[in-house]
Structures are given as C-alpha cells and as structure tokens.
Image (tube, rainbow, N blue to C red):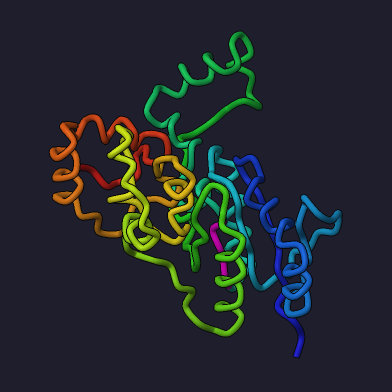
C-alpha cells in the first residue's frame, strides 16, 4: 500500500509552527516512514499537485490567497489547520478591528496604495474552506502534532480538548495567575498545551482559541473575585481573540 502523500503550505504567518515540525528531530523520521512529504517550501524545493493530506499554516489576508486555498482544498482528502494563524486567524486578525486603509497607511506609509500591498479582512482557514482537523497554539505543541497526524493516519478523529486551560493548570497545582495580579484567559481558552504559560509563571494569553462553549458566568465570577471587570478581560482577549465570535 502506498503511503499517504502530504503537502505543507503557508500563508500569512511567521512559519514558527512549521519550525516546530522540524524540531520533532528523531520523531520526524518516524513520521516520514509512514507518509510521503511531496511539498514543503520550508524544507524542500519539490512541488506537487497530487497529495492526500494538506497541512496549512497561516491566516488568509488577500483575495488571491482565498483562491489558492480553495485549490489546495480541492486537491486533498484531508486538510489540517496548523497553528493559531490558521485555526483562529492569529495575531494577524487584530487588523480587523480597524479600517483597512488606515492599517495599510500605518504599516506602509506612502507606499500603502501600491497594488501588491492590497489586503482584505483576515480570516482563519475554516472561514474560507472546510477544515478536517486542527492543531492549535502559537506555536503548536510538537507532541500534539504527532498525536493528530497518527490519529488521522489510523482513520480516527484526533483528540482536541474542549475544556479550559484552568483544568490543566489545577492538575499541575499551579498558583492561579490572578493571585499575581495578572489577567489570565485560562477560564475560557481551550486546553491541550499542558498549561505551558502558567506553568512558566506567565498568564495564558489565548493562543489556542476559545473552548466551544466557554463558561462565561464562571469567568465573570473570577473577575468579580479579584476586583476586575469584564472590560478588563476583553482587553486581554484582543491579542488572539479579535472578531472570533464569542463575546462576554
């Protein structure tokens, strides 16, 4: 039986999540034994229009990128959104809070009106085409990447947590970041990272996106307990939560 053919693509991103794949080191050799990588700009010069699995990193910020993504989707059986930019729009989505002409002028100055700098509202991959699997985070977790790929190869649904980071944080017996006068997004953000940031003495800033049904009332109770407001929380949600749909 031939191995599944895999192609990796990038759109608007820093390509840090692809670097995490490279950082798999010895484990990447195990994955190469079971898949055939046919296109990956960051690691090889070969290209192919024939692939079974497409892994897409980056948000969609231009009309021509939407068209390119639709072509990728039409050629693959499985499409995986890789990292925060692809899964939720990432930091790039912050520009959706402003007039796009103002954004271009702020970034490019006198060159803002040049045609090759045209830009649209930032979209996550699933706002353009259907997505079959998600690997969350900024950057992704290497272990989670391997788990998702293996599950798909076995024809199984990849396990993606739908409970908040607070669950993992409490399991590690971390002191709540609110006790350090930090506004942590752990009560409403999807787990799966092992509470990496709180375990490293930093608040959760939301790179994995919201849980599907965030406990809004519990989040409000936390804010009340520490003398904070919902507006304080919303200000911290902007970095990775711009125009995502969930509101408090």
Q: Is residue 208 left or right of residue 181?
A: right
Q: Is residue 25 magenta?
A: no
Is residue 1 or residue 27 the one in the foreground?
A: 27
Residue 58's x, y, as percent?
58, 46
Q: Residue furthest right?
A: 45
Query: In which quadrant of the rendered image does the C terminus lie?
Result: top left
Q: Is residue 76 left or right of residue 27?
A: left
Residue 88's x, y, as percent?
44, 49
Is residue 138 or residue 63 the one in the foreground?
A: 138
Magenta stretch, main secondary structure, is strand
Residue 48's x, y, as percent?
78, 63
**Which residue occupies 55% across, 78% down?**
151
Count of all numbered marks drawn on residues in the image: 0
Q: Is residue 72 left or right of residue 89?
A: right
Depicted 144 relative to depicted 123: above or below: below
**Which residue occupies 75% across, 75% down?**
30
Residue 213's x, y, as percent?
25, 59
**Which residue occupies 14% across, 40% down?**
225
Q: Residue furthest top?
A: 110
Is residue 179 or residue 122 the one in the foreground?
A: 179
Q: Is residue 215 left or right of residue 50?
A: left
**Which residue occupies 55% across, 65% down?**
144
Q: Which residues are magenta?
A: 78-82
Query: In which quadrant of the rendered image does the N terminus lie?
Result: bottom right
């Amino acid at each position: 039986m031939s191995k599944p053919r895999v192609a990796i693509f990038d759109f608007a991103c820093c390509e840090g999540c692809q670097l995490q794949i490279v950082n798999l080191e010895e484990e990447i050799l195990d994955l190469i034994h079971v898949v055939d990588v046919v296109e990956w700009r960051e690691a090889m010069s070969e290209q192919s229009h024939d692939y079974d699995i497409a892994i897409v990193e980056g948000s969609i910020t231009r009309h021509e990128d939407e068209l390119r993504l639709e072509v990728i989707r039409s050629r693959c059986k499985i499409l995986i959104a890789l990292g925060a930019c692809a899964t939720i729009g990432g930091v790039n989505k912050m520009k959706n809070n402003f007039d796009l002409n103002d954004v271009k002028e702020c970034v490019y100055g006198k060159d803002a009106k040049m045609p090759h700098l045209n830009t649209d509202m930032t979209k996550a991959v699933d706002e353009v085409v259907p997505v079959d699997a998600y690997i969350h985070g900024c950057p992704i977790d290497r272990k989670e990447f391997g788990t998702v790929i293996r599950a798909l190869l076995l024809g199984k649904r990849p396990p993606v947590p739908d409970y908040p980071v607070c669950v993992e944080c409490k399991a590690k017996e971390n002191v709540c970041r609110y006790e350090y006068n930090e506004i942590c997004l752990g009560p409403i953000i999807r787990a799966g990272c092992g509470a990496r940031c709180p375990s490293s003495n930093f608040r959760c800033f939301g790179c994995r996106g919201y849980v599907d049904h965030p406990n809004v009332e519990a989040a409000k109770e936390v804010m009340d307990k520490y003398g904070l407001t919902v507006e304080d929380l919303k200000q911290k949600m902007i970095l990775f939560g711009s125009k995502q749909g969930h509101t408090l």
